Amino acid sequence: MQFLRLIFPITPMTSRAHFLNTSVDNFTMRETVDRINQSIVENIRLRHVVVNASKIVEMQRDLELRKSVNNCDIINADGMAVVWASKICGKPLKERVAGIDLMENLIELAHNKGYKVYFLGAKEEIVSKVVNHYSKKYSKDLIAGYRNGYFLKEEEKDIAAEISSSGAQLLFVAISSPKKENFLYQNRKELSKVNFTMGVGGSFDVVSGLVKRAPLWMQNSGLEWFYRFLQEPKRMWKRYLVGNSKFLLLVLKERLIGSN
C-alpha cells in the first residue's frame, strides 16, 4: 500500500475533478439524488450525464460530444474504470454513480414525491415494456409520456417541445452516444420546462428484460463491461477491447505527462 501511495500520491478531494479532457463531479449516489431533488423543489433546471471509459475515449476526438458533456450541470462516473483513473490521475472520486442505478433511485423518488417522468428512446416495444414495468411497480400516475428513440434530426425540436409540454419533471433518454448527449444539449431551450434531463444509454434494455445486468460482484469489481461483452461479443468487441485499451493509454499518458 505504501508503494502504491508513492507512485499515486493521494490528492484531496474536490467537488469537480478535471482529467482526460473531462469534468466529473465528486458526488456520491446520495449526494447526486439530493441535488436533483432540490433542483426540482426549487424549480431549477439540471442537465445530467454519466461518463465511462468508452465515452471518454470518444470525447478525445469528438469535440461536439465533449462540449455537450462538459457543459452539463452534473457529471457522474458511470464506470469503475473512471473511478480508478481519477485516482491514478491524482483527482480521486468518492464512488461510482452508475446511470441505471441513479435512474432507478430517481424513479422511486418521483413516485414518493409525486413527480412525473418521461421516457424517450429504444424501440417501441422496449420503451413500452419499461413504462409498463414502472406503472405496475409504482403507479400509472408516474408517467408523463413516452416515445421510441427512432426519429429524424429535423424532428428533434418538435419532440423536445412535446416533452416539455408533457408536465414531466424528469426525462430519461435511452439513445446511444453521442446522439443523446447532443440531443439534450442542442435542444436545451426547447426542454426548458423539464427540471431534470439525463441520458441512460442501454438502461431501458435492462429494465425491459432484453439484456441481463452483470452480477453485483462483477459490477463492484469493474467487470460489468466484460459481462456485457460476453452477451454480444460480435457487437461489443471493438467498444470494449479496443476502447478499453485506448482508455488505459490515455490514463497512463495523463499520469506520466499530464494533459490538463
Image (cartoon, rainbow, N blue to C red):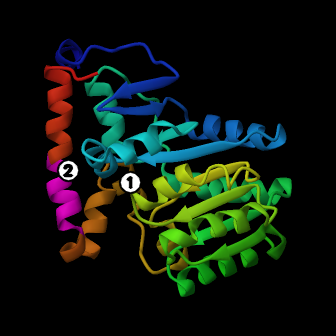
Please state if 230 lies on the left or on the right of 165 as rendered.
Answer: left
For the residues labelled 1 and 2, the Cα–Cα distance comes to: 16 Å
Q: Is residue 239 magenta?
A: yes
Q: Position of residue 29 (x, y in %)?
A: 58, 41
Rendered location of residue 221, percent (x, y): 32, 48
Q: Is residue 1 shown to the viewer in this render?
A: yes
- The amino acid beneath tag 1 is Gln
Is residue 77 at least partly visible in the picture? no
Q: Quadrant of residue 80?
A: top left
Q: Which residues are magenta?
A: 236-245
Dot 1 falls on a residue whose secondary structure is helix
- Quadrant containing the C terminus in the rendered view: top left
Return the disc, 1 or 2, that comes first in the chain's sequence: 1
- Badge 2 is on which residue? 244
Q: How many marks?
A: 2
Eyeballing the image, is 152 above or below 41?
A: below
Query: Does 15 sit left or right of 179 as displayed?
Result: right
Q: Residues within 10 Å of mark 2 (few under 14, many from 20)?
A: some
**In the rendering, which numbered label is found on residue 153?**
none
**Where is 130 relative to 82, above or below?**
below
Residue drawn 22% across the image and 58% down it: 240
Asked if residue 83 is positioned above or below residue 215 in the image, the reply reads above
- Residue 233 left/right relative to 66: left
Q: Residue at x 51, y 37 (%)?
A: 71
Residue at (28% x, 75% y) in the render: 231
